[in-house]
């Protein structure tokens, strides 16, 4: 089944196009990476798909249905590029995850205990069980990313959108993070759409790649779609050799 | 000098004490959202908008509490609507609505003849003048408001934390934001008679800000803010009787005293 179908999507800011006539499909259970230079419209694309910004023309279907925020048929997880929140917000990790935990119908005390147990299990999945009582503002970049992934998967989503999820995280943290995403993809059949600047990551973890530069430049399996010509046209001359080394390294 | 138990034999003081406890719980409970969402200017604008409602009620000969609630709700919805539909910043929209409401109120008051004590009761508040009907009104609104907030606490907090995440995860952000604006408007107008237009915002934000100085979790924030609100109300009321000062300002000054104490505690941590 097609998890995400985008047809002729155009997003404008004033008179200029941020995204122009972008069409693609992502099949269920796949990991798709969106790459492109800065200002290519990657975040705009995800935000338009998620209905966070309006689009001029085109259509977006998630699992065959238009995505509406109050539509309970489709469960979506989202980890934004930069989570904008007040660092002094008096909120523990456990409380944050309970915002999205499924409803437990029980007596108040019992309900709270079940919610806590559920949240603990989600944190264990992402290896962040020890963070449950920490204040959200006190977390490091890597810890926050793991918590945000735990939050994104709390309501058992069918599709997960990750906007540069590992930016600002050290190399070891990135490895752990993408291993986790791969594990969730394999174990739960979760469809993942992620934005990344790291072509090594794209080669290693993505089933499909979409190269965006306001328009869709190419799409397909990374080894096939990301040719020297495509990368040079998008990123410039310097990228040709890099692509070659990524490709060889990951074979 | 009378002891507290002797003073509490007076029905008007019993009512005042009950009112201060109820408003002491209600205002900070809602005030937590005002502080977390940085809506102090909004709540200030709503309380001052109630002035236009009171003036309109006085000239039309209708109940001042009712007219102030209606106008405050209308102004709150107007601010929410204009913020959503225009490219103007939220504080600019509030500034326009705020000054418009004050100007309207002053214009109407200027057209009236004679001195209206009841109008000034709303302006400065008089907890000792609370009637049993007022008390009942505060009780009903307190139960309703806290029940709504507790029922929808998760979506309200989620939106406060991050709107986009809340939206993607299926929360009707628009509905809950309008609902919160409505609740703030109602709570402010319900509390007006106790603390007055000029100072009502402080009862909303000061106990919540004090609690924020100490709380590391939402649960603690809500509990502490209500405790500070009740202490401010009760201690402020009793102090105002012994010191023979106005009750409203005394309650506010006690809450500000608590705020500075929590600041000291925070600085030590």
Image (cartoon, coloured by chain):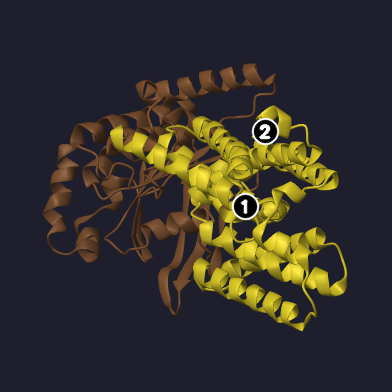
- Residue A144 or B89: which is nearer the viewer? B89
Q: Say what secondary structure mark 2 lies in.
A: loop
| Chain corresponding to brown in the figure | A
Q: Is residue A3 visible?
A: no
Question: What is the x, y in percent for residue B34?
Answer: 54, 51
Left or right of B102: which side holds B63? right
Question: What is the x, y in percent for residue B17?
Answer: 70, 37
Q: Quadrant of the N terminus of chain A?
A: top right
Discs 2, 1 touching: Cβ within 8 Å: no
- Residue A55 or B90: which is nearer the viewer? B90
Residue B2's disc is 2
Q: Quadrant of the C terminus of chain A?
A: top left
Mark 1: few/some/many CA within 10 Å (<14, 14-19, 20+): some
* Vertical position of residue B108 compared to residue A31: above or below: below
Question: What is the x, y in percent for residue B19?
Answer: 72, 41
- Comes first in the chain, label 2 or label 1: 2
* Vertical position of residue A179 compared to residue B125: above or below: above
Residue under numbered circle 1: B246
Foreground mark, 2 or 1? 2
Left or right of A44: which side holds A74? right
Q: Is residue B153 visible?
A: yes
Circle 2 chain: B
Question: What is the x, y in percent for residue B25?
Answer: 63, 38
Q: Quarter of the image holding residue B216? A: top left
Name the colour assigned to chain B in the rendering. yellow
Residue at mark 2 to residue at mark 1: CA–CA distance: 18 Å
């Amino acid at each position: 089944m097609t998890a995400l179908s985008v047809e002729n999507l155009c997003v404008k800011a004033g008179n200029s196009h941020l995204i122009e006539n972008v069409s693609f499909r992502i099949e269920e259970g796949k990991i798709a990476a969106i790459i492109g230079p800065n200002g290519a419209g990657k975040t705009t694309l995800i935000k338009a798909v998620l209905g966070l910004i309006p689009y001029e023309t085109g259509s977006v279907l998630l699992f065959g249905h238009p995505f509406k925020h109050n539509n309970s048929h489709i469960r979506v997880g989202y980890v934004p590029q930069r989570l904008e929140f007040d660092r002094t917000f008096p909120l523990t990790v456990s409380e944050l995850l309970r915002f999205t935990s499924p409803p437990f119908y029980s007596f108040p005390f019992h309900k709270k205990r079940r919610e806590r147990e559920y949240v603990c299990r989600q944190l264990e999945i992402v290896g962040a069980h020890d963070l449950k009582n920490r204040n959200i503002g006190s977390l490091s970049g890597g810890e926050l990313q793991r918590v945000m992934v735990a939050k994104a998967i709390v309501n058992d989503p069918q599709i997960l959108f990750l906007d540069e999820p590992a930016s600002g995280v050290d190399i070891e943290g990135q490895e752990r993070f993408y291993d986790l995403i791969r594990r969730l993809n394999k174990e739960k059949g979760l469809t993942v759409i992620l934005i990344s600047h790291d072509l090594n990551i794209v080669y290693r973890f993505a089933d499909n790649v979409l190269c965006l530069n306001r328009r869709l430049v190419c799409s397909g399996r990374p080894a096939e779609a990301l040719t020297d010509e495509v990368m040079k046209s998008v990123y410039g001359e310097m990228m040709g050799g890099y692509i070659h080394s990524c490709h060889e390294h990951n074979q | 000098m009378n002891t507290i138990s002797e003073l509490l034999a007076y029905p008007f003081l019993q009512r005042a004490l009950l009112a201060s406890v109820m408003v002491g719980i209600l205002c900070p409970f809602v005030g937590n959202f005002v502080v977390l969402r940085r809506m102090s200017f909004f709540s200030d604008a709503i309380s001052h908008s109630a002035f236009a409602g009171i003036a309109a009620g006085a000239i039309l000969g209708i109940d001042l509490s009712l007219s102030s609630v209606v106008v405050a709700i209308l102004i709150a919805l107007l601010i929410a609507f204009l913020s959503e539909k225009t490219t103007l910043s939220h504080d600019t929209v509030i500034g326009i609505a705020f000054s418009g409401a004050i100007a309207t109120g002053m214009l109407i008051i200027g057209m009236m003849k004679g001195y209206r004590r009841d109008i000034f009761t709303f302006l400065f508040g008089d907890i000792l003048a609370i009637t049993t009907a007022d008390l009942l009104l505060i009780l009903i609104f307190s139960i309703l408001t806290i029940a709504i907030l507790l029922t929808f606490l998760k979506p309200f907090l989620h939106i406060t934390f991050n709107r986009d995440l809340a939206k993607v995860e299926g929360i009707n952000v628009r509905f809950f934001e309008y609902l919160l604006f409505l609740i703030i408007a109602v709570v402010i107008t319900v509390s007006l008679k106790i603390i007055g237009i000029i100072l009502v915002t402080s009862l909303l934000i000061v106990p919540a800000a004090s609690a924020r100085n100490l709380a590391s979790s939402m649960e603690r924030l809500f509990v502490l803010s209500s405790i500070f609100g009740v202490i401010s109300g009760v201690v402020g009321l009793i102090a105002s009787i012994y010191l023979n000062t106005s009750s409203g300002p005394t309650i506010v000054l006690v809450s500000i005293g608590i705020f500075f104490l929590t600041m000291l505690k925070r600085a030590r941590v």
